[in-house]
Amino acid sequence: MSAPDSDRARVVRENLDRVRRRITDACAEAGRDPEEVTLIVVTKFFPVSDLRILADLGVRHIGENRHQEAVEKADQTRDLDLTWHFVGNLQSNKAAAVAAYADVVESVDRPKLVGALSRGAHEHDRVVDCLVQVNLDPPAGVSGTGRGGADPADVLPLAERLTQAGGLRLRGVMTVAPPDQDPAPAFRRLAEIARAVRELDPGATWISAGMSADLEAAVKASATHVRIGSAVLGRRAQIK
Ligand SMILES: *Cc1c(COP(=O)(O)O)cnc(C)c1O
């Protein structure tokens, strides 16, 4: 079998076109400028060759959720002009290392991470943009599912801590919609929380919400960043 690179590139291009159109349509419906919405393609489980295809197609923002995979891919694509978003659960003992290559850490959900990220940013002489990940799963559900995110009540203190930490810049909030239900209420709630965070720091304007299945609801609820994996790259191996 010859390497079906061009087939893969065609599939990714068609998928990407479809996703870009969905974003444009959702913006039109919401009366928003599509320029306000940044597409992050989440490339977890997909090879570096896909990142090259994406870069060729004008994608600049890449999301990854595991440190080991992310650091290897970032290392192998240094020749590309990519912005790296770390979107996964972060162990505090990995946080300093993530600060070495991540331009944005979207999953800050506890105070311990702030110190570790700040230390890493200093060590590598970088400034890392940070989002507070908010857990909007219904209470009393199955907890400890490892989805991550700060309790809404803990978001402001955590955001404040980020504004005070050297090498880190508070940019806003992020969420993953609760599973198996209408995402709209969670996204509206996130927008409210985002407003409160913005009062703390006017520079914290980012709202990262929306994945392949629910980007329209997120755009409608003021998302500035959508994180799209499968709708662009196809099904992932079912590990998580
Ligand atoms: C995998 C992942 C995504 C993308 O999910 P899709 O449903 O494939 O679009 C977005 N956000 C986070 C945090 C992820 O881990």
Image (cartoon, rainbow, N blue to C red):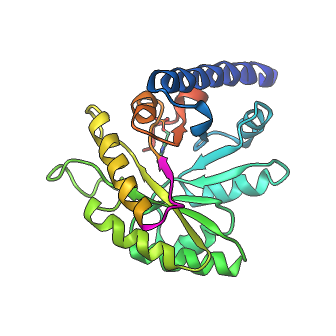
Label the magenta part by its dominant secondary structure: loop
Q: Is residue 64 left or right of residue 107?
A: right
Viewer-proximal residue, 198 or 91?
A: 198
- Work out which quarter of the rendered image holds the C terminus and state it: top left
Tell which residue pokes out farthest to the left in this image. 140
Asked if residue 1 can be seen in this view, the reply is no
Asked if residue 149 can be seen in this view, the reply is yes
- Work out which quarter of the rendered image holds the N terminus and state it: top right
Q: Give the quadrant of residue 56.
A: top right
Residue 204 included in the magenta stretch of the image: yes
Q: Is residue 180 left or right of residue 93?
A: left
Residue at horizontal 28%, vertical 59%?
Answer: 152
Q: Give the quadrant of residue 229.
A: top right
In the rendered image, the vertical position of residue 133 relative to residue 24, given as above or below:
below
x and y percent of residue 162 in the render? Answer: 48, 73
In the rendered image, the vertical position of residue 215 relative to residue 227, given as above or below:
above
Q: Give the quadrant of residue 155.
A: bottom left
Viewer-proximal residue, 200 or 102?
A: 200
Residue 238 included in the magenta stretch of the image: no
In the rendered image, the vertical position of residue 197 relative to residue 64, given as above or below:
below
x and y percent of residue 5 in the render? Answer: 79, 25
In the rendered image, the vertical position of residue 12 relative to residue 63, given as above or below:
above
Tell which residue pokes out farthest to the right in this image. 79
Residue at horizontal 51%, vertical 22%?
Answer: 28
User: What's drawn in magenta, residue-wise?
Assistant: 200-207
x and y percent of residue 58 in the render? Answer: 75, 34
Count of numbered tags = 0
Residue at horizontal 65%, vertical 21%?
Answer: 17
Viewer-proximal residue, 158 or 89?
A: 158
Viewer-proximal residue, 222 or 58?
A: 222
